[in-house]
Image: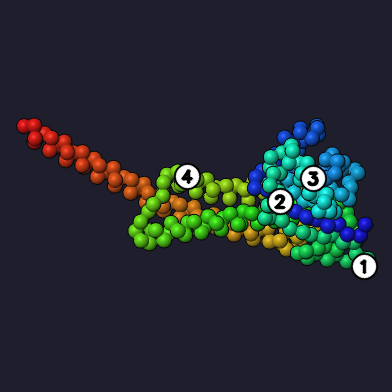
Amino acid sequence: MDILNFKAFAFSGELDLNKLAVTLGISRRYRWEEPMLLNPVTLTPVEESVKEQLMVHLYYFGGIVFVNCSEDVISRFFSEMTKIYDLFRGIQQLRYKDDYALKRGNTGETVITNDYAVMPELDQVFVDIICFVIAKSVALDQIEDKIDTVLDDVEGLIEQLKLGKLRITDEKLAKLAATILTFKYASISYIMVLDKPEVTWDNPEADRLYGTMANLFELSQRFQEIKHKSDTLKDVLEVVTGLSHAERSTRLEWIIIGLIFFEILLSLFWK
């Protein structure tokens, strides 16, 4: 086969591969950075020594990449997985997805673009790296969308502050803080944006492919942008939290003053 087609999706939550492995009757345990490789038709693991053209890569951070799978195979895979894992429900509505292709070239030259790569051989190492990069990229798409939504919400808070108003509950403040921390955790630890596959340490060609693809998909730049936006949200949150606490303290002081005044009136009335 002279071409491999990839289709990547991103879930909205973490995919517990060890829990899934138990459900599928797979005895091995998966490390955080290690994907689960399955045959999408039989739902059985693809052995390292017998890699197949038809497979699916599943990652802890919620990324999933199909290799050379038709729309029908993908649909049937999700249908079967829905029966055993809730995270797969509603897959038809997934917004975050991307396509890529790996082609075998006859000239011996290597070409890598945003949409496809041309390599002298369709080596499994290259397949693994492509899956890893586009899975990260699609997962980052999801975080970028969510953080922009939060920025829009925070813009409303800033407009309130311009008018000298502040209407936000402690519960909403806590949820906003949790959301901001989640962005940082997800992009650094969860999606492993700054981590390279282990194979790149021993394989110069694999390292070059990963570096080139990571640059093309702007993984580091997008991570820095997420970090910058998270820091901006954190700064706004600190200001809003400080003002909220100050407003609450002022309110309590006035209540105390009112109680003291009421106590004075009572004492004068009963004399």
Residue at position x 71%, y 38% in the image: 85
Residue at image mark 2 = 92
Foreground of the two, 161 or 242: 161
- Report the quarter where the N terminus lies: bottom right
CB under 8 Å between discs 4 and 3: no
Q: Which mark is residue 77?
A: 3
Q: Residues within 10 Å of mark 1 (few under 14, many from 20)?
A: few
Gap in angstroms between the C-alphas marked 4 and 3: 38 Å
Residue 31 seen in render: no
Q: Residues within 10 Å of mark 2 (few under 14, many from 20)?
A: few
In the picture of the structure, the residue carrying the numbered disc 1 is 107
* Residue type indicated by callout 3: Phe
Residue 79 place in picture, x, y as percent: 77, 44
Residue 174, disc:
4
Q: Amino acid at mark 4?
A: Ala
Left or right of residue 9, residue 154 in this image: left
Q: Could you say which is closer to the camera, residue 210 or residue 117?
A: 117
Q: Specify the amino acid type for callout 1.
A: Thr
Compare marks 3 and 2 and give the one earlier in the sequence: 3
Q: Earlier in the sequence, mark 1 or mark 2?
A: 2
Disc 1 or 3, which lies upstream in sequence?
Answer: 3
As helix, strand or loop, the secondary structure at mark 3 comes to helix
Q: Which label's residue is closer to the chain start, 4 or 1?
A: 1
User: Element at badge 2?
Assistant: helix
Residue 26 picture quarter: top right
Q: Are marks 4 and 2 in contact (CB under 8 Å)?
A: no
Residues marked 3 and 2 touching at CB (< 8 Å): no
Residue 66 horizontal/vertical position (percent) = 80, 51
